[in-house]
Amino acid sequence: MCDFPKNEDNTVKRNPDRGHYDKPTIYNILDEAMICHIGLIHREKPVVIPTIFARKNDHLYIHGATTSRLLLELQKGLPISLCVTHLDGLVLARSAFDHSMNYRSVVINGKAFLVEDENEKKDALHCISERLIKGRWDEVRPPSEKEMKATTVLRIEIETASAKIRSGPPSDNPEDYQLDIWAGVLPSSLHWGTPEADPKLKKGINQPGSVTAFYKK
């Protein structure tokens, strides 16, 4: 894997030492996220919309109803910006000014294209399903022809990308280290609870392996 070339669109300007442009770092952050936020100009106004996504190789897939405003607009080939963020901790400094967060984020610039090939479309939906819970696709009913026709899938080609990462303790002013004030990091993590079965579930149906493996990992 190579790096994404640095240019005026993706270069991290604030705290440039936190910027990363290599694909392994960027793709690892993307692959850990389930939701991205896509920004675009719609009717001369900025719009940001959250949506689930999945990555395959050097592009991303998103999907939705054929009537979706976002998908209809994106198909026009307009430039878009997409971002994901992971909160890893609250950084509690000795001064109010130096409080911060530990995080991993990615910002992508690119364009979206309609997936018209039925095989690629089905593969994209499989990727999105597997991104939610690995193995779930094989446990459930596949999409019907009607459902496939009601669904639009877009492929987002990545033109530029960069990651920005902060980690570690507070960075206080030298004189503030002498203050009698507690400082440190409050770590943050995403936790999945115990599965709750659908009240309408038929008797005798056990929890599938994909769900058990997911919430116990």
Image (tube, rainbow, N blue to C red):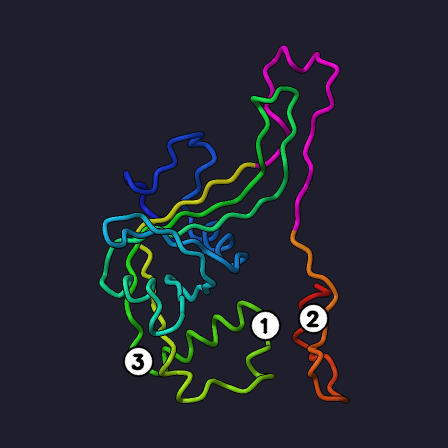
In the image, is 27 to the left or to the right of 198? left
Label 3 or label 2, whichever comes before in sequence order: 3
Q: Residues within 10 Å of mark 1 (few under 14, many from 20)?
A: some
Which residue bears the numbered disc 2? 213
Residue 172, magenta (yes or no): yes
Residue at 69% x, 37% y is 186
CA separation in Å, label 3 and label 1 = 24 Å
Q: Residues within 10 Å of mark 3 (few under 14, many from 20)?
A: few
Q: Residues within 10 Å of mark 2 (few under 14, many from 20)?
A: few
**Is disc 3 in contact with disc 1, using a CB cutoff of under 8 Å?**
no
Highlighted magenta segment, given as a residue range: 167-189
Which residue bears the numbered disc 1? 134
CA separation in Å, label 3 and label 2 = 33 Å
Which residue bears the numbered disc 3? 117
Disc 3 element: loop
In the image, is 126 to the left or to the right of 189? left
